Image (spheres, rainbow, N blue to C red):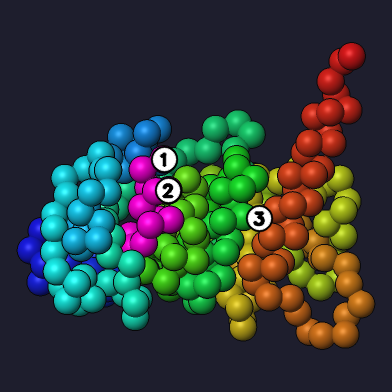
Amino acid sequence: MKLDDIKKLHQKKYRQAFGYFLVEGEHLVLELEKAAANTSHWGQAQLYVTEAYEHWPSPWPKHLITDRQMAQLADTKSPQGVLAVVPMPPASAETPAPGDKAIYLHEVQDPGNLGTILRTLAWFGGLRCLLSPGSVDPYNPKVVRASMGAIFHVPVETEVPLAALASRYPRIACLDIGGEAIGNPAFADHNCYLFGNEARGVPAEALTDLGAQRYTIPGAANIESLNLASAVNMAVYELNRSTRATTTSGTKP
């Protein structure tokens, strides 16, 4: 790609038009290399480096650029000097296999929240991330950085309407004050876990239409709500704990 086109990748419309996004910094590029070893798609990147990283070993084509050019391409104020231009994975709306589970985020807006959620999903594994229309772009540079490389390891689907969940997932759960505690064993018996916008949540009528079972994270209730990423983190931890406990108890000695 031309350098002028790479600069445009900071904007969603150009990421979508060109089909590429930016990965910046040593840690993220190393995570990309790990992912490329298992997924051929990630092996189609292009690397751009300054003189300080000229000898960086790379499995991809490498292009030497000046510090000034790197500053123009990078999203951070003090770029490290290594940046990859990466093809976005193909869009997919897969029919879930038996046992597959998903986290659905309705109109999530904060890049840091989404990046943190992706890190949690990558850590525990076994969950895909579905994003509604109107959500922050998962290939936004701020989301990519906040994910710390998790974006390469979690299946992500974008532009998934709320109404589409009913045909894909027979059992849907959501977090809501007044629901059953997430420690209830039934919490693990769902296919899709629905979380709402940071400020507005999920429309009540949509939850009713989906037949979503309500659960809550017990607390002292001194404040109105938890941060979205914190709520997802706790729910996924509990889901993983419950699933592991069930698996262990069902294992014959």
Q: Which mark is residue 228?
A: none
Farthest residue to the right: give it.
Answer: 220
Circle 1 sits in a helix, a strand or a loop, which is it?
helix
Tell me if residue 25 is in the magenta stretch.
yes
**Front tag of 3 and 1:** 1
Label 1 belongs to which residue? Answer: 34
> Which quarter of the picture shows residue 98?
top right
- Camera-side residue of 32 and 224: 32
- Disc 1 residue type (three-letter): Lys
Q: Which mark is residue 193?
A: 3
For marks 3 and 2, give the CA distance.
Answer: 27 Å
Q: Are marks 1 and 2 in contact (CB under 8 Å)?
A: yes
Disc on the earlier residue, 3 or 2: 2
- Residue 36 percent location from the top left of the image: 35, 39
Measuring 56% from the left and 70% from the top, which residue is drawn there?
113
Measuring 25% from the left and 61% from the top, which residue is drawn there?
52
Read off the magenta span.
17-34
For marks 3 and 1, give the CA distance.
Answer: 29 Å
**Front tag of 3 and 2:** 2
Measuring 23% from the left and 49% from the top, which residue is drawn there?
55
Q: How many marks?
A: 3
Label 2 belongs to which residue? Answer: 31
- Disc 2 residue type (three-letter): Glu
Tell me if residue 167 is in the magenta stretch.
no
Circle 3 sits in a helix, a strand or a loop, which is it?
strand
- Disc 3 residue type (three-letter): Tyr
- Residue 17 percent location from the top left of the image: 18, 63
- Camera-side residue of 132 and 45: 45
Is 181 located above or below residue 90 in the figure?
below
Q: Is residue 232 left or right of residue 178?
A: left
